[in-house]
Amino acid sequence: SERTNERTNERTNERTNERTNERTNERTNERTNERTNERTNKRTNERTNDQTNKQTNKQT
């Protein structure tokens, strides 16, 4: 019947939307993590380089 079809379609749409959202969230989180890691690594490297330069300057 029409009502049964409507319910089936609603459930199918819900599941499809859930899966789509999950995959979108996973990709978004991956990209966010990559960018965060890049920035963190850049800052860490800058600080390490600063410290190394200070030590080198003290020695000369």
Image (spheres, rainbow, N blue to C red):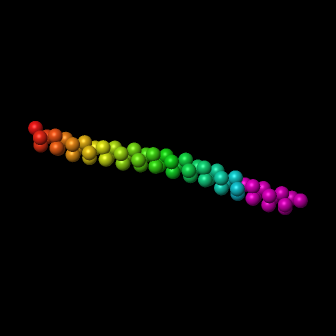
Relative placement, left or right, of 18 versus 34 is right
Q: Residue at x 70, y 57 (%)?
A: 14
Q: Taken as a whole, is the magenta stretch helix, strand or loop? A: helix
Residue 50: x percent and y percent?
22, 44
Magenta stretch holds residue 7:
yes
Residue 6: x percent and y percent?
81, 58
Q: Is residue 10 above or below residue 51?
A: below
Relative placement, left or right, of 46 versus 9 is left
Residue 48: x percent and y percent?
26, 45
Q: Residue furthest left?
A: 60
Q: Which residues are magenta?
A: 1-13
Kindly indicate the quadrant of the structure image that contains residue 41: top left
Kindly indicate the quadrant of the structure image that contains residue 55: top left
Q: Residue at x 53, y 49 (%)?
A: 28
Q: Residue furthest top?
A: 60
Q: Is residue 39 above or below residue 11?
A: above
Name the image quarter holding the C terminus: top left
Q: Residue at x 80, y 58 (%)?
A: 8
Q: Residue at x 72, y 54 (%)?
A: 13
Relative placement, left or right, of 55 versus 15 is left
Name the image quarter holding the N terminus: bottom right
Residue 36: x percent and y percent?
41, 49
Q: Residue furthest front?
A: 59
Compare residues 4 and 54 and report the one nearer the observer. Answer: 54
How many labels, in total?
0
